[in-house]
Image (tube, rainbow, N blue to C red):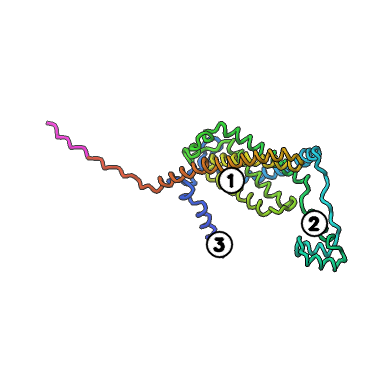
Amino acid sequence: MATAAAGALGLLWSWLWSERFWLPQNVSWADLEGPGDGYGYPRARHILSAFPVAAGIFSVRLLFERFIAKPCALRVGIQDSGPYQAQPNAILEKVFVSITKYPDEKRLEGLSKQLDWDVRKIQCWFRHRRNQDKPPTLTKFCESMWRFTFYLCIFCYGIRFLWSSPWFWDIRQCWHSYPYQPLTSGLYYYYIMELAFYWSLMFSQFIDIKRKDFLIMFMHHLATIGLITFSYINNMVRVGTLVMCLHDVSDFLLEAAKLANYAKYQRLCDTLFVIFSAVFVVTRLGIYPFWCRRTIAVMWRAAQRKKKRPPTQKAPVAAAPAMAPIG
């Protein structure tokens, strides 16, 4: 049984990392084990360094939210108080947890007779109990301020790094000499910081206040981590930096709009949301599909055609005529 499972796992692993799919013709994973220049070529073991960095980022987040974000929230008038606590009641709590959080009229009338409460009072209890599970505005402000700060910083770093990179101005450079593209320190730090941040978001979901979109955000973080990891191991880091930068530019604007909404600066919130919408449409619905993905698809199809093209046969060289003997 163990041998069969190991064999099946080996087949799955070889299929997942098929050199025929991931790499150009006549290139193997062993060829990328060479030193290269700078930091060498990306390797799978580099990904492990993201975990201690993620733990460090999470620790910085806790300090940031307590000593920077929370004072800022109090300064703009957000109260440090949780939601109104519902009156303890074992019967209503059992219905809320086990049956429904939104009882219908029939159930409300039954509970009213059982508890000798007014229906309106029971409705009020369920409303307070639902609000009790929601994160307070102060918590949401601190979380958004942390994400805004990180997205803004990593976007500024990405722009500064890409500004001096040739593939920022000519995307075809993303595939020049691929996959023999040495890893630089700037690329390495950019990738590891982005990967570590999303790992920290995934971990923190399990200790933060549960949200309604918990599963959706969990799948989003998982997909993001998978894409960053795969692109790093396959040395597609050049085009990966462009994709990450295009996503970060709208993320920090969205978090800024949330901050203004929590602080009840409605006009600023509306302005920021309009700017976010415009940037989102331009970057993710314009630049990303029609510039980034289209160029990638064209270059990839060209590489695949080159793979399938049969090797050209050289014409036979005609034998030189024999020289007549002298004398």
| Residue 14: image location, x then y, percent | 50, 54
Q: Earlier in the sequence, mark 1 or mark 2?
A: 2
Residue 141 falls in image quadrant: top right
Is residue 1 shown above or below 193?
Answer: below
Let me know if residue 193 appears in the view.
Answer: no
**Tag 3, which secondary structure?**
helix
Quarter of the figure that contains the N terminus: bottom right
Residue 198 % position (x, y): 65, 46
Q: For the residue marked with disc 1, what is the amino acid?
A: Ile
Please tell me which residue lies in front, 177 or 32.
177
Amino acid type of the residue tagged 2 in the rendering: Arg
Q: Position of residue 245 (x, y in %)?
A: 60, 39
The verdict on residue 76 being magenta is no
The first of marks 2 and 3 along the sequence is: 3
Identify the residue under disc 3. Answer: 5
Q: Amino acid at mark 3?
A: Ala
Quadrant of the rendering where the C terminus is positioned: top left
Q: Which residue is mark 1?
A: 228
Dot 2: few (<14), some (14–19), or many (≥20) neighbours within 10 Å? some
In this rendered view, identify the residue nearer to me: 4 or 270: 270
SS for dot 2: helix
Nearest the camera: 319 or 310?
Answer: 310
- Residue 245's place in the image compared with 4, above or below, is above
Q: CA distance from mark 1 to mark 2?
A: 42 Å
Question: Foreground mark, 2 or 3?
Answer: 2
Question: Which secondary structure class fits the magenta region best?
Answer: loop
Of labels 1 and 3, earlier in sequence is 3
Magenta residues, start to end:
319-327
Question: Which residue is pictured at 17% across the width and 35% down the height?
Answer: 323
